[in-house]
Image (tube, helix red, strand yellow):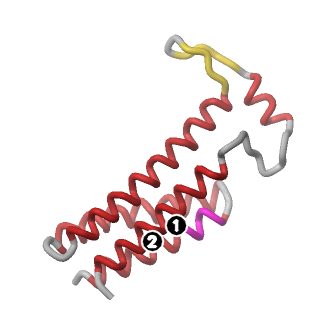
Amino acid sequence: MTTTLWLRISSVIALLLGAGHTLGSRKYWSPMGENPVLQAMRDTRFETMGVSRSYLDFYMGFGYSLSVAELMLAVLLWQLAGAAPTDARRVRSMVGVIALATAASGFISWHYIFPVPAFFLLALLASLIVAIFVSR
């Protein structure tokens, strides 16, 4: 199996992670359903840089930003897969940086959020590590 194939697999995993994150936030979501904390986030508004926002606005905005970053990662991994056959050393160093960021994100997800995205990040990390070793 080639580096290109492993990076394409990684790309698909990142795409699934981004799609899952986006679909999971189609509406205001809480694992405990509607609750006082969610209501307080919705109701607590403040002025910042000339606009009125709530804590829920920030929460949703950060979530959608994460979805965009995951989708961007999927595209970049697909593009790196195309470059791998001709520039393996350079691609390997970029994939190494992505693998480190993925490991950190997986730890954060496991520790602060919940296991499902951490499992996807673990699968992504594994495929990136294989791509690095296959490229040698």
Q: Which residue is mark 1?
A: 121
Q: Secondary structure at mark 2?
A: helix
Q: Residue at x 64, y 54 (%)?
A: 112
On the rendered structure, is 122 left or right of 98? right
Is label 1 in contact with label 2 (beta carbons under 8 Å)?
A: yes
**Where is residue 88, by image quadrant?**
bottom left
| Residue name at image x 45 percent, y 77 percent | 126
As drawn, is 52 to the left or to the right of 40?
left
Amino acid type of the residue that numbered disc 1 sits on in the rendered structure: Leu
Q: Which residue is mark 2?
A: 125
Which quarter of the figure has residue 133?
bottom left
Whether residue 4 sits left or right of residue 67 in the image: it is left
Q: Compared with residue 125, is residue 135 higher up or lower down, i.e. above or below?
A: below
Residue 9 highlighted magenta (yes or no): no
Above or below 72: residue 135? below
Magenta residues, start to end? 116-121
- SS for dot 1: helix
Where in the figure is residue 24, as x and y percent of width and height?
Answer: 66, 52
Q: Is residue 120 magenta?
A: yes
Quadrant the C terminus occupies: bottom left
